[in-house]
Image (cartoon, grey):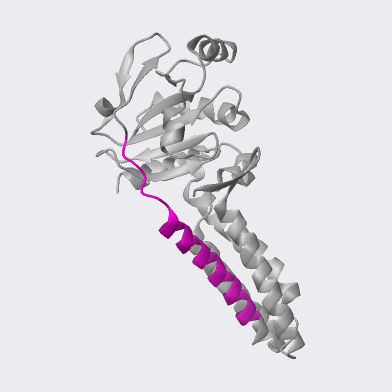
Amino acid sequence: MDALRLGPLVLPWAPLLLVLGYAVAVWVAGVAQKAGRGNAEPALLPLLIWALIVARAVFVARHSADYSSVLAMIDIRDRGFDPWAGWAAAAAGVAFWVWRRPALRMSLPLSASTGAAMVLAGMGALTLLQPARPPLPDLTLQTLQGRSVALASLRGQPLVVNLWATWCPPCRRELPLLIQAAQQQTGARIVLVNEGEAAPRVTAYLQREKLTDPGVLLDPGNRLLALYQSPGLPTTLFIRADGTVQRVHIGELSAATLQQGIAALQK
């Protein structure tokens, strides 16, 4: 339930819920306009964009040390947003519009709050429908050199387990970041598990890209991908020291979202 799969596309639920909430808000604004309450629709899209900009800006400010360039800061593929800042910005935006255009004092708060309620209800429903994630399993995987590693032996420390493949473009983009993090003291052990590929292919890819092997583990049968019912790659599991899964991130990570996940494991 972390993302919706439509054929080859894997769509995270959060942006889909935002689109749904916006559509509901537009519909409510139309109903309010017909009732003579003013036309709030022109204000809704600017409000949404404003809230997203503020949520992103606050997240980037909090994690500025993890962004290497302005381009990285505006690259929202890592889905790094501060939700509380976004909600606060939306509320302030509604108040500003109502102050500037008193005719919207009924229709704009009604439509915006209905859309927000739809988003929150969707998030709540997804949380309730999310099946319990199994703990880190007692599987034994192989390194590229053929050494056996029991995943159960990794318990006792926070883990970031990244499921990836060489054919996956976002996996390839985030791999250097994860390898670098695996070589540093980040507060959690980084474990890279290749899904569905053989050792020669993975080794050749690392050599071609001049990447150091950080102890990649092989899961040729896609057992972890199936166990956690992931809709696609990359999938990153943030696992507590006791082996339970705290969070699953579907899609590409940035240094900031990686550090955010590790920090949450240490609370």
- Quarter of the rendering containing residue 78: top right
Q: Is residue 100 above or below residue 155?
A: below
Residue in view at x 34 percent, y 11 percent: 147
Q: Is residue 190 visible?
A: yes
Number of marks: 0
Residue in view at x 73 percent, y 90 percent: 35
* Residue 16 x %, y %: 61, 56
Judged from this view, the residue extending furthest toward the bottom is 36
Of 107 and 152, the residue lying toward us: 152
Secondary structure predominantly adopted by residues drawn in magenta: helix
Is residue 47 something that shows in the picture? no
Q: Is residue 130 magenta?
A: yes
Residue closest to the eye, 226 or 205: 226
The percent position of residue 154, horizontal first and vertical second, equals 28, 28
User: Where is 217 relative to 111, above or below?
Assistant: above
Q: Quadrant of residue 22?
A: bottom right
Q: Residue at x 49, y 61 (%)?
A: 123
Region of the chain picked out in magenta, as a range: 108-136
Tell which of 44 and 2 is nearer to you.
Answer: 2
Of the pair 237 and 50, the residue shown nearer to us: 237
Res 242 → quadrant: top left
User: Is 8 placed left or right of 138 in the picture?
Assistant: right
Q: Position of residue 99 (x, y in %)?
A: 65, 84
Question: In the displayed structure, does residue 178 sit left or right of residue 73?
Answer: left
Give above or below for 79 relative to 116: above
**The stretch drawn in magenta includes residue 170:** no
Residue drawn at x 65%, y 73% as measured from the top left:
25
